[in-house]
Amino acid sequence: MSVNLQKGQRVNLQKDGGGALRRVMVGLGWDEAQKIGGFFRRQEEIDCDASAFLCTGGKLMYKEDIVYFGNLRHATGCVAHQGDNLTGAGDGDDEQIFVELDRLPEAYDKIVFVVNIYQARERRQHFGMIKNAFIRICDAETGKELCKYNLSENYDGMTAMIFGEIYRYQGTWKFSALGQPTQDNGVGELANRFIN
């Protein structure tokens, strides 16, 4: 049974029977809120981009440890982004990132999952224009959803979001629902938060 998480909650990542997970799918989703404006005013679609930061000692050490639309697969092959969704249209996951937990080198102790609005400042867009945002973790071998975190606060003026993190703790993997909004403009500014 899937666990619905609240901001700040943590959960152990394990199979139904308590066994270790080998591979997870991290699904991120969002919908564009109703557009408001005059008849002749055309607003650009909101393009959200999901990324994964592979951290060592809680820090991002190399730019190659960022998996996103411009670097779909980590050099280890253990983290793979399934591609960029430009609009967020449709139901379900908008972007998916697969993680092979059992093969991830010991040097990586945390994977942080973030979403930013592409060219947010230039397009004058923010997370207040987005609804139904979520992150969910599934057992990639069975497709079973393990946990889900729905963002429910007002994020007017915020252009990026640190959704959550998978981290190693005493030999097991856990997920923490963070829901931390930022005003970072793009994946580069977000990444700077995790650099030494």
Image (spheres, grey):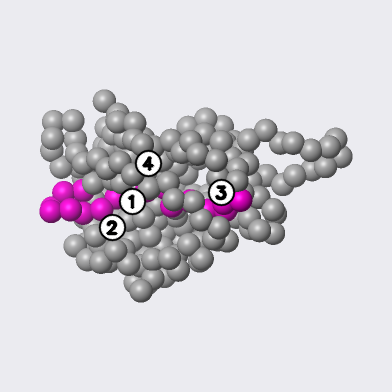
Q: Which residue is mark 2?
A: 110
Q: Which residue is mark 3?
A: 48
> Mark 3, mark 1: which one is toward the viewer?
1
Crowding near the residue tagged with mark 3, few <14, some 14–19, many ≥20 C-alpha atoms within 10 Å: many
Residue type beneath disc 1: Glu
Q: Which residue is mark 4?
A: 7
Quadrant housing residue 3: top left
Circle nearer the N terminus (2, 4): 4
150 over 79 or under it: above or below: above
> Mark 1, mark 4: which one is toward the viewer?
4
Query: Residue 59 at x, y = what percent?
Result: 32, 67
Confirm whether residue 72 shows in the render: no
Query: Quadrant where the N terminus lies?
Result: top left
Mark 3 vs mark 4, CA separation in Å: 21 Å
Instruction: Say which residue appears at 44% left-offset and 50% top-offset.
Output: 180
Circle nearer the N terminus (3, 4): 4
Q: Secondary structure at mark 2?
A: strand
Q: Which residue is mark 1?
A: 165
Circle nearer the N terminus (1, 4): 4
Q: Is residue 7 left or right of residue 38?
A: left
Circle nearer the N terminus (2, 1): 2
Residue type beneath disc 4: Lys
Mark 2 vs mark 1, CA separation in Å: 7 Å
